[in-house]
Image (cartoon, rainbow, N blue to C red):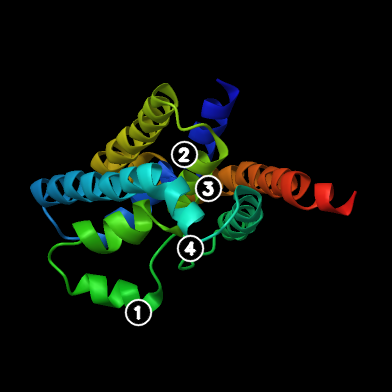
Amino acid sequence: MAALLNTFVMLFVVIDPIGLAPMFAGLTYGGTESYRRRMAVRGTLLAGTVLVIFVFVGKPLLHALGIGIPAFQIAGGALLFLLAIDMVFARQSGLRSTTEREQQEAEQRADISVFPLAVPLIAGPGAITTVLLMSGSSGQTLMGTIARLLVLLAVLVLALGSLLLTTRIMRFMGETGANTFTRTSGVILAALAVQFMIDGLSAGVLPQLR
């Protein structure tokens, strides 16, 4: 139960449903409510498909590449820590948002559901890393897989809700309020990322030094 709660918190922080609102508002500026709703639903479904694939192929993929779980915990923890730094300082980088050139390309597209909404805004490197860590760190039992999928589904539903309520969220919180929430979430993510690195060092490095 604790592991699932930990996974939920990490996925929620990494995907950052509240932080998606201002970016989605900018990408769909001038669009009708019907257009925003269509992009939100399609983008969330596509992102969910990508992440579900990694839930099932995560551990076999690491095994095929010859990457041990401790090594991935250290590398994944480091990546998530860099993501946390971006969140704390409210910086937009390729880890959790589009780059400037990607943003310019997205503005020329009528359909933003695949790029940049599904990837990289929802199913970005941080979310994919979290799903891989989630799949590799726990058992591959049927109940365990179902539980992980339910956790992922819960976070995606929250993300979809945030996208559908973007106008109200921006009116209530504003960009400053959304950034404040993101900064607070970044501190939590930093602690979880460090814990992943500690677990990886404890399991993979320290035993070899003894």
Horizontal arrangement in the rendering, residue 83 relative to residue 132 (left or right): right
Residue beneath label 1, please?
A: 101
Q: CA distance from mark 4 to mark 2?
A: 15 Å
Residue 146: give its label.
Answer: none
Label 1 crowd (10 A; few <14 / some 14-19 / many >=20): few
Q: Amino acid at mark 4?
A: Leu
Q: Amino acid at mark 1?
A: Arg
- The answer to which of marks 4 and 1 sits earlier in the sequence is 4
Q: Distance of mark 4 from mark 3, alpha carbons?
A: 14 Å
What element does badge 3 sit on? helix
Work out how far the residue at label 2 is from the one at label 1, CA to CA, in angstroms: 27 Å
Identify the mark at residue 95; answer none if there is no mark.
Answer: 4
Residue at coordinates 82% horizontally, 47% vertically from top-left?
207
Instruction: Name the residue furthest right.
Output: 210
**On the rendered structure, is 160 left or right of 137?**
left
Q: Residue at x 63, y 41 (%)?
A: 188
Residue 14 vs 78, above or below: the answer is above
Return the residue nearer the eye: 32 or 194.
194
Q: Name the residue that disc number 3 marks.
A: 182
How crowded pointer 4 is (Cα within 10 Å; few <14, some 14-19, many 20+) is rated as many
